[in-house]
Image (cartoon, grey):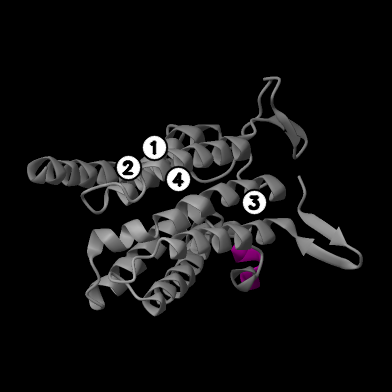
Amino acid sequence: MFPVIQVGKLAIQTPGLLIILGLYLGISLAEHFLPKEKISVNQFYAIIFIGFGVGIIGARFFFIIQNIKLFSSSPLNVFSLDGDLLDPFAGVILAGISILVYGYRNKLQFWSTLDLFTPVMAVFAIFLGLSHLASGKAYGVPTSLPWGIDLWGENRHPSQLYETIAALLIFLVLWRRYGRQGVPGIAFLLFISSTARVHLFLDAWRGDGMILVVGIRLQQLLAWLVMTMGLFFLDRQMQTRDATG
């Protein structure tokens, strides 16, 4: 793990740097393909600002719910700038909802707007996995497999690498399809349903997070709900494409 990069007397938090880099690259990529006739640059960055703000607050709130004892003993941790005290998956969901609300109030095309931000989310997901690897967060359960990594005193599944590789593969698959769909929304729905499916599977090897019942984690329940909704609307959009094609 590399939580800190030392540059002379300056100590830079690697996880935070990776998250900022992921956001920058994702936003730059999305802006490059921004169709100006559908959304203005000002609207694009307004959505980024609102989504990021709501996502951070929501990610902290859900992290508090899962780690209530930590915050009960030290309530000021609620205002901590530590990026490890966040639930990224919940943050992404709430950020998406805030984007939908903004788009509705500004009469933006629903599915087309979501497609525009798919590159941001897809690139960010890759760097989020790298951030977890740097910080040691989202660590795996103990294992005897030869590719395990030594972390927190035990040999563990490299769940952060699983997460990063899966996000990279999803990005590469979507990149080949991005902008080539006749029906809006397909890129976004493919992204969220694929990402949720990956988390539903990979989170079984996570060593952190809240276990609800029979070994099922809160992250897996959220992933199942997102996957179900994503596949439902994806099927509807596919039917629309077939009907108009």
Q: Residue at x 65, y 69 (%)?
A: 81
Amino acid type of the residue that numbered disc 4 sits on in the rendered structure: Gln
- Cα–Cα gap, marks 3 and 1: 21 Å
- Dot 2, how many residues are within 10 Å of its Cα: few (below 14), some (14-19), or many (20+)? many
> Helix or strand or loop: what does disc 1 sit on?
helix
Q: Are marks 2 and 1 in contact (CB under 8 Å)?
A: yes
Badge nearest the viewer, 2 or 4: 2
- Cα–Cα gap, marks 2 and 3: 24 Å
The residue tagged 3 is 131
Q: Are marks 3 and 1 in contact (CB under 8 Å)?
A: no
- Cα–Cα gap, marks 1 and 4: 11 Å
Measuring from the top left, give residue 44's x and y in whole percent: 40, 72
Residue 228: image quadrant is top left
- Cα–Cα gap, marks 2 and 1: 6 Å
Measuring from the top left, give residue 168's x and y in whole percent: 53, 41
Amino acid type of the residue that numbered disc 2 sits on in the rendered structure: Met
Q: Which mark is residue 227?
A: 2
Badge nearest the viewer, 4 or 3: 3
The answer to whether residue 145 is seen in the rendering is yes
Q: Are marks 2 and 3 in contact (CB under 8 Å)?
A: no
Q: Are marks 1 and 4 in contact (CB under 8 Å)?
A: no
- Cα–Cα gap, marks 2 and 4: 12 Å
Q: Is residue 138 left or right of residue 2?
A: left
Secondary structure character of the magenta stretch overall: helix
- Dot 1, how many residues are within 10 Å of its Cα: few (below 14), some (14-19), or many (20+)? some
N-terminal of the pair, mark 2 or mark 1, is 1
Amino acid type of the residue that numbered disc 1 sits on in the rendered structure: Arg
> Helix or strand or loop: what does disc 3 sit on?
helix
Amino acid type of the residue that numbered disc 3 sits on in the rendered structure: Ser
The answer to whether residue 212 is seen in the rendering is no
